[in-house]
Image: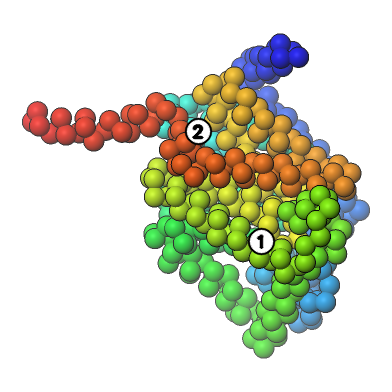
Amino acid sequence: MLASLVRARVAVIALFQKLPWSGWLAWNIFVGVAIARIHPRRFDSTFAAYLDAAERLWAGERVYNPLTLGDFLYFPISLLIHVPLTKLDPVSAAAIVLTIDAGFFAWACAALMGALLANQGRSRDALALAGVLLFINIPAAWFNFKGIQAQVPMTAAMIAACASMVRGRWNVASFWLFIAITVKPLAIVMVLLCAALVREMRLPLLCAVAAMLLLPFAFLDWSYLLEQYRLMGLKLWLIATEPPLEWFYQADFSTLVRALGIDPPASAMLGVRLAAALGTLALAWRVRRAGGLHSFAFAVLLLSGCYITLFGPRNEYLSFIVLTPSITALALVMIARADADYRGWLLILAAVGLGFVWHMDVNSALKPAIVLAIYLWLTWLMAVPTRWREIVEGDETLRAKASEPAVARAATGNR
């Protein structure tokens, strides 16, 4: 069995070494097929709902129903973006949005791989590895592409923010997080982590959130918009406090514990979410204190994805694409350094497994269990930040950085 796995690993590596751009080829074919297969039957429950809500917002009708878990629940600004699309044929509008989303997602993944590998002398490999990352994430992207889900551009913007943070471009990172939270409120997790831990990003992020909330007032009646914000707040509270079985598509920590025969009250689950938020913040803080932009920025992205999928309100079984690209990127960084690192291959298996749609019982139990295992592993790594930095930056890079001050002092003394 072990010999078979080794042969399979060698064969996979040989394939991508011989055809380094095959991942990009597969991704582009996939995107072309997804665009060609656009049909209202596929996006009726998602993209069509965005268009319908945008029409109601522009007409001054009620958008949010605080008595139901379904229906629209994003910020009004995201609907304003969709208003021009309501003037087009729905299929044409869907094709435009999907093309933009696919290109944005691919660019963000390439930027992330380039940022992570820049300090390891693997810059030339980064673009080819980004194609591998995209290829691995086709299962996760497929079901989101069919519905033209907002999860895709939100994830792309979060990834772009991480790539900018790696390079210390705080204002650019804040801009991408503005895009992320404008598209979907769940990006607030990464926004709050960055605002709490990065002094340079606090003011830009405050301005970004203010702009996201206030810009719609330039286009809509103030009293009407304030009422919509009030209804949205009530709806978000309902989502955060309802038992998990109330939402058929849910797949998170609460559905996992129910699958184990535990039936906690909604108030207890809310407490778990709050405790997990503090724990996630503590881990990111430890990594931040240890230094290293690569390891910190990547930690924030991974922890945000884990928290959103495990503890975010009403996480759905299709929504794990917010995490799968980052764990794939981590896997490829590890495998590029040592192709026999079994942890990287396990992460790839996890990304593929999270991407597919299984039976509802499997979706609601197995997928959160996989994320929980990854989150606990990250917790173990980041509890001692040096362990995490070695994973992300490599032993040789860390040793080189540690020797820089001594080299600089010696050079100064010789002048």
Q: Are marks 2 and 1 in contact (CB under 8 Å)?
A: no
- Residue in the foreground of this view, choosing between 334 and 269: 269
**Which quadrant of the figure contains the C terminus?**
top left
Query: Residue 85's quadrant in the figure?
Result: bottom right
Seen from the viewer's position, the closer of residues 14 and 43 is 14
Task: Decide which of 100, 154 is in the foreground and name it.
Answer: 154
Left or right: where does residue 202 sit relative to residue 76? left
Q: Secondary structure at mark 2?
A: helix
Residue behind mark 1: 272
The residue type indicated by label 1 comes to Val
Disc 1 secondary structure class:
helix
Q: Which quadrant holds residue 8? A: top right
Measuring from the top left, give residue 112's x and y in whole percent: 54, 40
Mark 2 or 1: the one toward you: 1
Task: Give the numbered dot on residue 391.
Answer: 2
- Can you see residue 23? yes
